[in-house]
Image (cartoon, grey):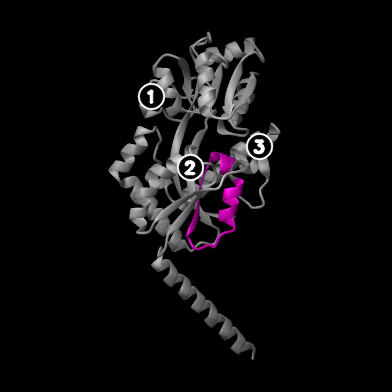
Amino acid sequence: MRKVLLASVAAWAIAISGIASVCAQDYPNRPVTVVVPFPPGGQVDTVARLLVDRMRASLGQPVIVEHVGGASGSIGTGRVVRSAADGYTLNMGNWTSHVGGPAMVSPAYDILTDLAPVAMLLVAPTVIVGGQHLPPNNLKELIEWLKANPDKASAATVGLGSPGHVSAVQFQNVTGTRFQVVPYRGGGPANQDLVGGQVDLRIGAEASQMLPHVRSGRIKAYAIMSKERWQPAADIPTTDEAGVPGIQIAVWTGLWAPKGTPKDVVARLNAAVVETFADPAVRQRIADVGFDIPLRDQLTPEALAAFHKSETQKWWPIIKGANIKAE
């Protein structure tokens, strides 16, 4: 009897495996929904609009973008975590939803294990900039000036626990400086006050948003917060070159599926991303808005998993050490 039962279980497992394989081979045969865990108009929405049309062509099915905002991205991400692991509901998130947010709000899921990585998407380099009214003209001079004027300067940030907020905390920790961190509801008002001299600095701001103000002479650029220089502004040194190594942050985006999604479905989605990035028209649109495309070996699911884990290991201690919590 026991042998018969084991044989039945084995046959059932083989049958289920075969069904899953057939389903994966047929994937996709209906529309795919990409959940963006923020309201329209933000960075992830921009990335979605750049990529989704070309992904539709690769997958041969409609790809629908759905915005589910709230709680630093955890509401929309949680919805995908709870979705069927069939590749038809995906999560497009960024540093805030997948690094900063989970450290602040303690969601009811494990951001590292409850999602299946598909691919890294786009990377937005960040920059340290200051108002034209500031005396310092380079990063070393800025640090010296901040040390000579503790708590007198101000840095605008967009969002509690955002890359700008957290990198401003890291900057103070590494350089031994102190300044006020001023939260803003959006990048537009923050940039307006920086240009107008109402605030002094922006740290960890998207370089593409700052470059027009730098080129017009309305603000000063002190450093790009990456390991390599940014091609559209190759004259701006990196933080390493400017004498403050290790202060680096990028506003990156990625694509995930629910945990347990069949590997060949993940591979199909990954291939759609790679095909999208190979399209010259897409690459040009990406360059026009100032994003970077990861190198080919950084586009695998394994590369996204490793990078995501390294980001949490780097930033979670800083966020928790500064007691940054969602309001």
User: Whole-percent x and y of residue 184?
Assistant: 59, 27
Tell me whether the residue at label 1 lies in contact with that at label 3, contact meaning CB atoms closer than 8 angstroms. no
Query: As rendered, which of 238 and 151 lies closer to the eye?
Result: 151
Mark 1 to mark 2: distance in Å? Answer: 22 Å
Residue depicted at x 38% and y 20%: 235
Q: Which span is picked out in magenta?
A: 74-99
- Point out the image quarter for the C terminus: top right
Q: Amino acid at mark 3?
A: Pro
Q: Secondary structure at mark 3?
A: helix
Pointer 1 or 2: first along the chain: 1
**Magenta run includes residue 142:** no
Residue identifier under label 1: 233
23 over 44 or under it: above or below: below
User: Whole-percent x and y of residue 233?
Assistant: 38, 24
Pointer 3 or 2: first along the chain: 2
- State the image quarter where residue 175 is shown: top right
Pointer 1 or 3: first along the chain: 1
**Magenta run includes residue 85:** yes
Residue identifier under label 3: 317
Judge left or right: residue 296 versus residue 251.
left
Q: Residues within 10 Å of mark 1 (few under 14, many from 20)?
A: some
Mark 1 to mark 3: distance in Å? Answer: 32 Å
User: Whole-percent x and y of residue 202?
Assistant: 54, 22
Q: Secondary structure at mark 1?
A: helix
Residue depicted at x 62% and y 34%: 161
User: Whole-percent x and y of residue 315?
Assistant: 60, 37
